Image (tube, helix red, strand yellow):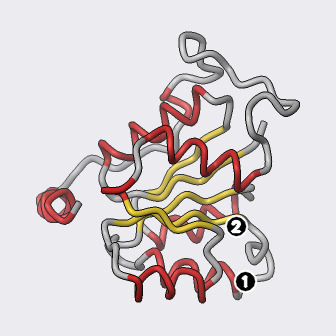
Amino acid sequence: MTKILLVEDDKSLREIYGVRLLAEGYDIVSAGDGEEALAMAIKERPRLILSDVMMPKISGFDMLDILRSTTETKDVKVIIMTALSSEDQRKRGEQLGADKYLVKSQVGIEDVVRAVHEALGDLPGVGTNPVPVSQPAHTYASFAPVSPPTSATSANSSSAAASY
């Protein structure tokens, strides 16, 4: 089963994307920030990383730069998702080696799923058997554990949600 690392500091979005990608038959591991994602990328060896840009500790851009300069992760497919729609930000993502750059306000969940399939070269109907939504291969319990929110984390989540 193809493994995807989902990197998103907004827990609700992480759950929404994770559950939908599980329904497609992917094995999902998740991280709440770029620092955690870097460690998980080396440990879990995902085929694709789907990452937000604006996150605590290490931004998605900085994480991508490190991924591309690390032997174990330099060839992993990376899709960047962000609220930043400026052309400069898009170019920065491309220069750092993002395989795709999605602006959250311009795409829906099905667009994200399609981008994942395209990046992995496993479009449905072309030799794949996605799991029906009513019968996911895993439960959400298979996600990596997320620490309970602290007052600092709650403040970050509120500001992250507001920036979305």
- Are discs 1 and 2 less than 8 Å apart at CB? yes
Quadrant where the image shows the N terminus:
top right
Which residue is located at x 56 percent, y 36 percent?
21
The disc placed on residue 70 is 1
Which is nearer the eye, 107 or 158? Answer: 107
Viewed as shown, does residue 72 lie left or right of 27? right
Q: Image check: 123 left or right of 39?
A: right
What residue is drawn where x is 67% and y is 20%?
131
Between disc 1 and disc 2, whose residue precedes?
2
Q: Is residue 106 above or below residue 140?
A: below
Q: Position of residue 62 (x, y in %)?
A: 49, 84
Q: Tell me if mark 2 has few (under 14), some (14-19) or many (20+) residues whose alpha carbon lies within 10 angstroms of its own.
A: some
Q: Nearer the viewer, residue 156 or 52?
A: 52
Is 62 placed left or right of 153 in the picture?
Answer: right
Residue 75 position (above or below residue 12): below
The residue tagged with tag 2: helix, strand or loop? helix
Q: Residue at x 11, y 59 (%)?
A: 151
Instruction: Give the image quarter of residue 17.
Output: top left
The residue wearing badge 2 is 42
